[in-house]
Amino acid sequence: MNVIQIVALVLFLIMYVLMLVFSEKRPYITSGAAIIFIVLMVINFIVYQDNSFGEALGATAKTAFTDLSSWNVLLMIAGTMGVVALFIESKMPSLMADIIINKVPNVKWAMVGLALFASLISAFIDNVATVLMVAPVAMTVCKKLEINPVPGIIAIAISSNLQGAATLVGDTTSILLGQETGMNFVDFFWLNGRPNLFFIVQAGALTSAFVLLFIFRKYTQPLEQVEKTKVTDYFPSFLLLGIIVCLIIASFFTIPVPWLDSLKNGIICITIFLIGFIRKLIKTKESKKEVTKEAVKSLDFETLILLFGLFIVIGGLGALGIIGKIGDAFNNIAHSLNMSPNATIFVLYTMIVFVSVIISSFVDNIPYVMTMLPVITALLPGLGLAPGDNKAYLLYFGLLIGATLGGNLTPVGASANITGIGMLRKEGYEVKTSTFMKISVPFTLVAVFTGWGLCYLIWGIW
């Protein structure tokens, strides 16, 4: 590693330590780190790629600010935040909370039920959008019962992350896997005569549900029947439903214009928010200025800034060649193992799963998966495998299981976690890393070990 790579890696580690220790300062920490990474990228382009200062600035700007997948996520989160604010204002979350309170026996089942509901939804739409839709209901339940909402929101966030690998449209990483292997939507359910990722993830969801039941075992407060809230405006609910339907439909189509296709999910969410905002402007008796101010206030800028800073840092790691060195390490290990082919594949599969869990706890899983997919493809010939072989799928699926579930370990490992914590912060609750990990670590480990074992049983042995 050269000097700049070492400095960048040390800075990256310091950034995450500071984020874990000073949770309330995370947006400022990532913003500062992003600025330093931009400087490092400029120096790297000048020193190691022999660019002029102007060329280095241009290359850095292209790396830091033109990643369309990052802008797509930010637009999608911002649009969904705006629609969710209208949704909350309509009192629909309060009505849903009343229905839940009247249907389940105690708080434990209310919290676990909402987490499982979020888990199911996130198999078909983005995890962040799921948190933004379901968390307000949990928040309302907790307010009505005067209990701490932190554990419930954490459970919803990590449950949303769990299902990202279940379907082709569950997460960006699943889409990347489909592109690399040629898998379609149905293949995630059944492939080569075998049950596939959808059922593997559901097994992980089932076992991790028992972890949630244990965590919420003391939440035995009975839920007394309450009078249902009256909702007079159902339009925001239709807007939220429209986001879900449009995102699912959009996943089946490719727009011929590449940049537009990369931003389509974000454009959908922003457009639907603008429809709701314009409607409110027309119908409201308040001043237009006040309505606009409320709309801007509904956007959690701290969360958006935090994510934006993280995207720049992770893009910098890729541009500086640090993420690529992870792939080199797997290549070296594959060539150094003096074992039988089956044993080598098992060891590599296990390493891919658990190294991905660890790395994805701190690094956004999208650039990591983008880097590792071609690495795995390059490993196959040396293992005597072709891309369509069952044991080749084992390695690909191990990557997705590890990278998707790994973000659950820490509060900054996944966008859904950051979003959930941001919602709690707006309500006056600061979430300590230790509080988050008391729930996330056992939940994640149970889900990962279940997925790891079942995936090997289906694709490595059977």
Image (cartoon, rainbow, N blue to C red):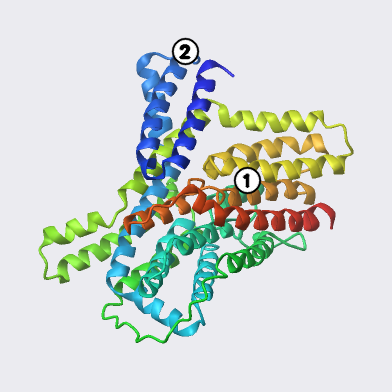
Q: From the viewer's side, name the closer residue of 283 and 229.
A: 229
Which image quadrant: the C terminus? Answer: bottom right
Label located before the other in sequence (2 or 1): 2
Residue at screen point 74% across, 28% down: 332
Q: In this view, does 60 lie to the left or right of 3?
A: left
Q: In this view, does 331 lie to the left or right of 71?
A: right
Q: Where is residue 2 in the image (x, y as percent from the top left)?
A: 56, 16
Q: Is residue 69 visible?
A: yes
Q: From the viewer's side, name the closer residue of 407 and 277.
A: 407
Q: Which of marks 2 and 1 is in front?
A: 1
Disc 1 crowd rating (10 Å Cα; few below 14, some 14-19, many 20+) is many
Q: From the viewer's side, name the closer residue of 295 and 193.
A: 295
Disc 2 crowd rating (10 Å Cα; few below 14, some 14-19, many 20+) is few
- Label annotation for residue 357: 1
Q: What element carries label 1?
A: helix
Q: In this view, does 411 lie to the left or right of 342?
A: left
Q: At label 1, which amino acid type do we have?
A: Val
Q: Mark 2 points at which residue?
A: 47
Residue at screen point 39% across, 36% down: 29
Seen in the picture, residue 337 relative to 23 is either above or below; the reply is above
Q: What element carries label 2?
A: helix
Q: At label 2, which amino acid type do we have?
A: Val
Alpha carbon of mark 2 to alpha carbon of mark 1: how far?
Answer: 34 Å
Give the number of callouts.
Answer: 2
Seen in the picture, residue 233 relative to 316 is either above or below; the reply is below
